[in-house]
Image: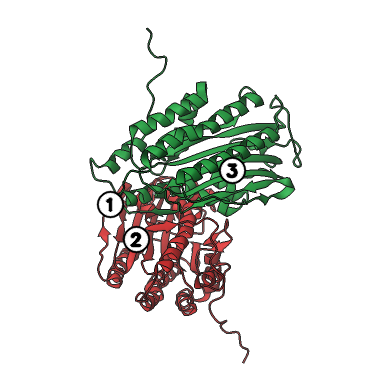
Chain colours: A green, B red
Amino acid sequence: MTAAIRPVLAYFMALQDKLCDALETMDGEAAFAREELPGPAGGLARPRVLADGPNIEKAAVQFTHGIGDALPPAATERNPELAGRGFQAASISVIVHPRNPFVPTTHMNLRFFLVDGSGSGVREASSTSGRHPMWYFGGGFDLTPCYGFEEDCVHWHQVARQAAGAHYGTFKSACDEYFHLSHRDECRGIGGLFFDDWTQGGFDSSLALVKAIGDAFLPAYRPIFERRVAMPWSERQRQWQLYRRGRYAEFNLAIDRGTRYGLQSGRRVESVLASLPPKAAWRYGYLPEDGSPEAELMTYVKQPRDWLPAVDNSGD
Amino acid sequence: MTAAIRPVLAYFMALQDKLCDALETMDGEAAFAREELPGPAGGLARPRVLADGPNIEKAAVQFTHGIGDALPPAATERNPELAGRGFQAASISVIVHPRNPFVPTTHMNLRFFLVDGSGSGVREASSTSGRHPMWYFGGGFDLTPCYGFEEDCVHWHQVARQAAGAHYGTFKSACDEYFHLSHRDECRGIGGLFFDDWTQGGFDSSLALVKAIGDAFLPAYRPIFERRVAMPWSERQRQWQLYRRGRYAEFNLAIDRGTRYGLQSGRRVESVLASLPPKAAWRYGYLPEDGSPEAELMTYVKQPRDWLPAVDNSGD
């Protein structure tokens, strides 16, 4: 039950390796550029980006272990009493921008914060019972299709529900709420899981949940990827994909807390913005034609939807 | 010396007409889509966007006259005592994204705020001597080339200096400071003029300065446009343009106060985001080759530069 950074780092780094291998296989040709960048006070970043593959236009799978003197404002927005404390932060961040417009974009993030009680130099902490030291997990995964395939959304959420268990409903709602473009009153995609400030059940139980979610990412995404990747697509569908990616850029640059935290904390800008689409487009006042597949996608993202039949709802 | 919205509206609307006509001529083919959208309490928006022309990939020239109950937070960041007051706001906003990578992107904004003393329903105000009612002007113009042509930058700043007169130095520095991507430690472009909360010399004198700047936009931009628009360009130059436009999107979505104000105040999102480039690209870890024209452009934007020879510096 002792919160410790070591098993978290080990899991995140192993998951990074596994996901990079899988994505290289799924692309079939391109390889991740891999770097190891030592950070201050013994931290480490392993940014890995794959670009211009035949199937994957851009993927970033990044591991970071940061050790810092003082939490930046964006990280303490919802926990103001933590402002200024020293910390360790570990995260793995995944984004896949496929080339084929029928293959959805996906994103996963898992992160662990360990906050110092004294202001600097923390290494490990042992409970959440006092106000400090403390720790928490956050993360989740979500899917952003350009075209609506109901079976993909159902599969995605089935795997998500399996991974999150009893927390699925809460995490699903939190995901819908977080990935929301308030200025457009649109969802970024069709959701998935999102959790933050997570300590429930203690460290071991929380880490087990995080591992279950991390391990579920490939089973959730890969079947969808493989089902769609060979579908022929046209210039019209490419243009729609670029237009939808504009929304992705809007969310990441104007709204996303992780991006703001990354930019505020002076993290390597190319790593923070590796999530941005390789290409994006904006078209003034554009509305897809009524009854078109593009208009149908908008019904998928206009408001959150329950993708799974209710469970345990029948009385007999 | 009485501050009044009427002459401001008249100037902004006439300027909008003039600029739309000129840009249509400069493009040679495409026309602005023109709308008139009545706003609450007698306000009016005239969004105008030209798209997909042979020479201009996208241009937005927008006039807005808004009448509101309460200033939004982004508008009162630097004047917190104004929070919650009723207001009238008039603005003209111009953005040109040319197709040819050798023609720079440009932006102009002129705006007028008239703040109510009582909380709602203000029509006109007469002085800045008390804390309320009050008014101020803001705005400026700036240039964002993808390739560095020193003569273009010198011309741009010569016209800017002529328009701003004694205020050129102050406005030029403010422009460099405002259009700065802190997360990249880069300027958005090569600057121009920027001013805000402007009341100096009273209303008539301020309006005259605003008019001088608005009238200078075409003499500043058009000769550069015409000098570059027929230059042949290649796919490499197009890709660089898209990449540089990524920086533009980063600035507008993550940093720009005007965009944040627009999104916060619930303004029509297509108008607020009409400044975004029609297409943009991001390339992870990209650095232009040493000695290339792309690398040279980076020396133009890495830090602010004085583009004009010093004036009145010789003692004899």
Give the mark nearest the N terminus, 1 or 2. Answer: 1
**Marks 1 and 2, how far apart in space?**
15 Å
Quarter of the view holding residue A62: top right
Tell me the quarter of the picture where residue B45 sits.
bottom left
Residue at x 37% of width, y 61% of height = B92
What residue is at 52 percent from the left and 55 percent from the top? B284
Same chain letter for marks 3 and 1: no
Q: Chain of mark 3?
A: A
Q: Which mark is residue A74?
A: 3
**Is B186 on the left-hand or right-hand side of B242?**
right
Give the Cα distance between marks 3 and 1: 37 Å
Query: How many callouts does the rendering have?
Result: 3
Type of the residue with mark 3: Ala
Residue A210 image point, x, y percent: 58, 30
- Number of other residues with Cα within 10 Å of mark 1, as a class: few under 14, some 14 to 19, many 20 or more: few
Please state, as top left, top right, bottom left or bottom right, where the N terminus of chain A lies in the image.
Answer: top right
Residue A33 vs B298, above or below: the answer is: above
Classed neighbour count for the residue bearing mark 3: other residues with Cα under 10 Å, few (<14), some (14–19), many (≥20): some
Q: Amino acid at mark 1?
A: Leu
Give the x, y percent position of residue B107: 42, 65
Question: Is the C terminus of chain A in the top left, top right, bottom left or bottom right quadrant?
Answer: top left
Q: Which chain does the numbered disc 2 sit on?
A: B
Residue B303, relative to residue B115: is it above or below?
below
Give the residue pinned by disc 1.
B37
Provide the residue designation for mark 2. Answer: B60
